[in-house]
Image (spheres, grey):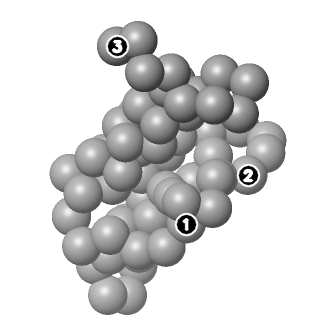
Amino acid sequence: MEYEDYKIEIDGTMGYYSVKPKGKGSVPTQLRGLYTTRQFAINAIDLQKSMKKGKTDGKTDTST
């Protein structure tokens, strides 16, 4: 399954999910690891995107 700029793939042995890059590149450190459900992986991607969007010049944007 593709979501945002990532692929969410199932582990072939234990049934866990992992986040992979859609193309070349790597996954941010916060998204590495295994997730028990696809929804947990989606939530982690959304959280990463919102945290990334909230920062400007190394400072957190508090205007929202």
Residue bearing mark 2: 26
Circle 3 residues within 10 Å: few <14, some 14–19, many ≥20? few
The answer to which of 9 and 6 lies nearer the viewer is 6
Work out whether 13 lies above or below 48.
below
Q: Quadrant of the N terminus?
A: top left
The residue under label 3 is which amino acid type?
Answer: Thr
Can you give x and y, in whole percent of width and height, for residue 11 in the image?
41, 75
Tag 3 residue: 64
Q: Give neighbour class at mark 2: few <14, some 14-19, many 20+ (Cα, 10 Å).
A: few
- Disc on the earlier residue, 2 or 3: 2
Which residue is drawn at the image coordinates 74% and 24% (left, top)?
A: 57
Q: Amino acid at mark 1?
A: Arg
Circle 1: is it few (<14), some (14-19), or many (20+) Cα within 10 Å? some
In this orientation, does residue 10 appear? yes
Disc ID at residue 32: 1
Report, in whole angstroms, how far the alpha carbon at label 2 lies from the one at label 1. 10 Å
The earlier-in-sequence mark between 3 and 1 is 1
| Residue drawn at 51 percent across, 58 percent down | 31
Residue at the image point whose x is 32% and y is 75% from the top: 16
Residue 59 falls in image quadrant? top right
Q: Quadrant of the C terminus?
A: top left
Secondary structure of the residue carrying numbered label 2: loop
Q: Residue 49 at x, y = what percent? A: 47, 33
Name the residue rendered at 37%, 42% in the picture: 47
User: Where residue 23 sits: x, y (%)?
Assistant: 71, 38
> Residue at the right extreme?
24
Q: Identity of the amino acid at label 2?
A: Ser
